[in-house]
Structure formats: structure tokens, C-alpha cells
Amino acid sequence: MSLRSQTHRTLIGAAGAAALAIGAIASPALAATSKASVAYTCSTPLGPAHPSAVYTVKSAPPKMAVGQPVGTKAKITLDAGTTLLAQGLGWSKFSGTIKTPPSAKQAGLKLKVAKTALANGPGGTTVANAAGSTLAGTKTGGFTFKLGNLGDVVLTGYDASGKKLSPPVEFPTKGSFGRCKNDAGTTTLKTGPTAVTTKIVKDTSTTKESAAYSSKKDKAHGTAKVKARYGTPATGKVKFLLKKGSTTIKRATDTLNRRGIAKVSFKGVTAKGKYTIVGKYTGSATLKRSSGKASFTVR
């Protein structure tokens, strides 16, 4: 082998190794996770409960849609006193869900707690695993992931035989149960010493249109249902167009209700033929525009 050929192969090998190294550094699989440790105080009729949690969250992308989830695992610990409170209800095991809606300034949580035996940890404590998502904030712009109070927590107990006990315990309720408060007020999610931040942008929406026609009343009815990709409540208005062929013959507008639904009726629809009702969602501060259409025939 000539010296030139050997040198050429050596250079290619070095370049290939460098490319592999760069690829490994940039690989999402090696991206650092983020952590937050939070202590809570929950009020119960039997006395205060003191659960704590360590959240491990996948690396958040630099840009996220409103309410977008990030994969999350949590290790939840009930101190010995809280464990005794649960055992006092006749529980041997428990499972549960945690649903904390995000806000403009704080991240949300959507977690499922695995069925766990009480007093499985040292000193009579209980350690449970949970998995799900941390949710991005609800306002566009720069956002720092901070965790506050737990929102809706539903815990289901099981007796020693494995039978599910009812009713489940829910926080908060209108009765004696209060919120599970973050003892520190808010806790910032961090990668090492650095706070986790992202840029929040509008989420996409879909508009599903349906149409119906009443020959007795000569009325056409249009219904638009708007949904966000990541579950943000749809607000704002829908503009409806009644079209015969390619010609728009009537227009109307309605405001979405709490379920993201808008409705209109068009009177005096009598000419025979095929019609289309188009629903155009105009978007909001958190959702992009979308549209849908549906057809009906007057015979």
C-alpha cells in the first residue's frame, strides 16, 4: 500500500470518527433530562398529609405549542404519618391520577400513579411510581417551567384482598378536603443548575363541520366543533358560509360555547340542488385558524 493511499484512509477514518462523535453529542437520545423536587401539604379530615415528589422530565424542545406535553416520570413518597392516614381508611394499596391544568405562568401535570403497596419504603414510608406528562403553559411567548400546587388528585384504595374501596379520595372537594399545596409556592424545573425554558407558540386546531336540512321549515343548520391538538379550550368565533356550488349565498357568525361548539341556522333555503356549509374558525390568542365543511341536498 502506498503512503498516499494509507494517509487517505487514515484521514477518512478520522473524519468518520469525528462525525460519529458529533452525531452522538447531538443525538436526542442523549439529551439531558430535567428534574424538580417538590414537597406538598394536603389537608384531610384526619389531619395534614405530606406527600413529596421528584419529577424527571424529558428535555423540552426550544419551541412548544400551548399545552404541549413532555414525557415525565415521578417518584412520589408518602411520609410515615401520611401512610398511617391512608391505612386508617382500610387501604393496603392505592393507585391514582394527578391532573393539574397549566396556566400562563406555571406548567401542568397529567400523571397516572401505579398501584402501590402502602408502607413499602423505609421507616413505614410509601414510595410510588407515576408516569405521564408535564404540560407547557397557556400563554404564547417565553416560558419557564415551574410547578405549583397539585390540581385534581384522585386516589383509589384497595384492601388486603385487592378489592377496590369506594369512594375514592379526591383533592380538592367542596367538603373537608383542601388543595395539595406546594410548600415552596413554586418549584422550577432544572437541568442541572439551569432553569428549563422554551418558547410557547399557538397550537393548531381542527374544525369539524356538520350540516342538516329541514324541508318542512326550509332551514339549513350548521354546527362547527373546534378542538385543539393538545386540549386547550377553544374560544372565539366561527364564520359560517352557505354555498350553492361555488357561490356564497348567506353568511352568519356564532361564538363558541364552553364545549367549543358554534351553531347557525339559515332560513329560506328552497332552491333545489347541492349546498355546502363552511365553518371558518377565526382563531384565538392560543389557537391557530382552521375550517371544515359539510354538504346537504335540497330535493
Image: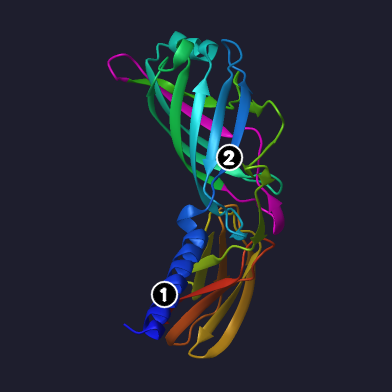
**Residue at (56, 54) in percent of width and height:** 68
For the question of whether residue 174 can be seen, the reply is yes
Q: Which residues are magenta?
A: 135-163
204 up-or-down from 30: above or below: below
Sequence-earlier tag: 1 or 2? 1
Residue 274, image quadrant:
bottom left
221 up-or-down from 258: above or below: below
What amino acid is at disc 1?
A: Thr
Q: Secondary structure at mark 2?
A: strand
Is residue 275 magenta-colored? Answer: no
183 up-or-down from 210: above or below: above
> Badge 1, how many Cα within 10 Å: few under 14, some, many 20+?
few
What amino acid is at disc 2?
A: Lys
Disc 1/disc 2 C-alpha distance (Å): 43 Å
Residue lying farthest to the left in this orientation:
161
For the question of whether residue 209 can be seen, the reply is no
203 up-or-down from 108: above or below: below
The disc label shown at residue 35, or none = 2
* Residue 275, percent from left and from top: 46, 83
Judge by depth and name the residue closer to the eye, 285 or 54: 54
* Residue 262, percent from left and from top: 57, 63
Q: Quadrant of the C terminus?
A: bottom left
Judge by depth and name the residue closer to the eye, 5 or 227: 5
**Residue at (47, 65) in percent of width and height:** 23
Residue for badge 1: 10
Q: Is residue 190 left or right of residue 278?
A: right
